[in-house]
Amino acid sequence: MKFRSLYVVAATLALTAVSMQQSQAVEYDLTVDRVAIDIDGETTYGIGYNGASPGPVLRFREGEDAVIRVTNNLDETTSIHWHGLILPYRMDGVPTISFDGIAPGETFTYRFPVRQNGTYWFHSHSGFQEPDGAYGSIVIEPESREPFRFDREHVIILKDKHPHSGDRIMRNLKMSADYYNRKQQTLGDLFSDFRDKGIEATVADRKAWGDMRMVPTDIEDVQGFKGLINGKTPAQNWTGLFNPGERVRLRFINASAMTYFDVRIPGLEMLVVQADGNNVQPVRVDEFRIAVAETYDVIIQPKEDRAYAIMAESMGRSGYAAATLAPRDGMKADTPAPRTKTPLLTMADMGMDHGDMPGMDHSKMQGMNKGVDHSTMKGMDHSKMQKMDHSSMKGMDHSKMQGMSNKADDPFYATGSGLVPAAENGGRFLSYADLKAQKPRYKLRPANREIELRLTGNMERYVWSINGVKYEDADPIRLQYGERVRITFINETMMSHPMHLHGMWSILDNGNGKWNPVKHTVNVNPGTTVSFETEVDEPGQWAFHCHLSYHAAAGMFRKVIVEGGPKSASTSTIN
């Protein structure tokens, strides 16, 4: 009897503990402020959280509730979006879509259950506050143990801090789309091409780009930034500590406004274990490219008692961020010389006719779409560009094409693209094709329907759009709760676009079937077609947009409305 009583008491305490755990809420208070940002001794001004940029690391555990009170100390409306978190739409933080925004002087309380784990981040979704410094990171620990071992961890948040404010950058881009392109080709490049390609081919190539009013260095809209890691420049040297032999988890977040980074740690392999907060089957790489808004978690194991450099160079080689991993404070790694050779776009990146390329025999090509008429491309209206299906081209010998890359094919780059990355040490560079989910999040089933979205733009007017229509003139995309929808992007522009769907996961089709990785941001390179599927399981209104800040603001943005579903989910309370 005595034993039974003890058992009842123990069971009651256990149930109480479980109940307390389930109802536990983690609370944060954030203020949104004008802040000073120190860039190598020069003070610039921007927007931050709790008086600093970047904001704090918010930590949660899967299964608990988040309560975050945000007080707006600005003289303008603000908002915070929890990038990658699956939550009730009214907590998503996008003004005019999920709520009205936070007025000056007001405090808004976000409340939502934490239903996932991994590495995420948060940022303003108002104006250009995010490029101006309003960003921070989120770490969510899993309910059960991690499927990989590590001894310590560091958050590595990348940023492109520009001396110009976001508003000023947008004005300048509207005035001249290549305002910030500091990698224009020179007279020296012309003579170099004469030597390498021959005069006739060089003139033809220059004429083709001139007809399109484009340049092959048009890879990044905004150059002249300072690369930051955790808010520090390379000279300011953010340092993460380790003990030799430890397994160190690095949570990489690209919080940049416009910059893709190629990341390496000379002397160390990286084991990729998470992409966009979801576990993947481990992949050993020497380098990876992280698109704007993506996250990658990697594990390293430095064994030597020395400092290592984290090197993150922009895709267009116009800037870099760097930091140190070291066994002791005060150490600084030798930063490798940044690569300065600028990649060049090719006609493949334009998804266009290769007619001017010597060595190409059109008579041998089958299935080539001849619908591209250069004469219609004055002012570069990408909406007039027809899709080219490279997979259907037979008889094309890329080795004979001048201006095209001979690098190994990556299915997520157009064949012959000038943007195909290569590891500095000749080792392995991560591809989307390498990513396999460790555990399928959803049961594999066929999509109910497919929606085709062409990524389009008019470079001369700096207008970015979807299906040739910018956001202000577009109808919402309507989905039905419970369906599975396949979204196919056809990138008809010469730029990469990191496409982010709020509120629901994006299951990237990289050919791995039920092991296809689950992401929140899907990068689409020039001249390519990329598909993902989504289980439509979150009612409400959501944003869906390119995460390059100035592309989204210029029109590459859509509202998605999920119709139907549980009423309680779509009417989650605010405040």
Image (cartoon, helix red, strand yellow):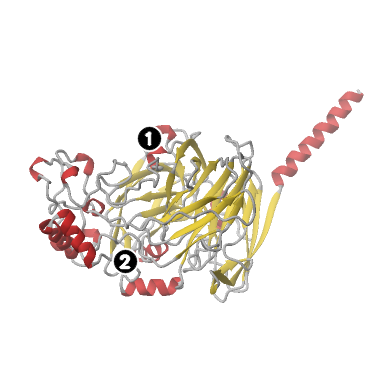
Q: Could you tell me which residue is drawn at 47 percent across and 53 percent down?
A: 311
| Placement of 453 over or under 171, stated as above or below | above
Residue 176: percent from the left, percent from the top? 30, 73
* Mark sitting on residue 446: 1
* Mark sitting on residue 463: 2
* Mark sitting on residue 128: none
Q: Could you tell me which residue is drawn at 59 percent across and 44 percent down?
A: 115
Q: What's the residue type where badge 2 is placed? A: Val
Residue 337: percent from the left, percent from the top? 42, 56
Residue 127: percent from the left, percent from the top? 47, 69
In space, the residues marked 2 and 1 are separated at their CA atoms by 35 Å
Secondary structure of the residue carrying tag 2 is strand
Mark before the other along the chain sequence, 2 or 1: 1
Q: Residue furthest bottom?
A: 75
Secondary structure of the residue carrying tag 1 is loop
Residue placed most toward the observer, 135 or 38: 38
- Labels 2, 1: front one: 2
Residue 316: percent from the left, percent from the top? 35, 58
Q: What's the residue type where badge 1 is placed? A: Pro
Residue placed most toward the observer, 292 or 535: 292
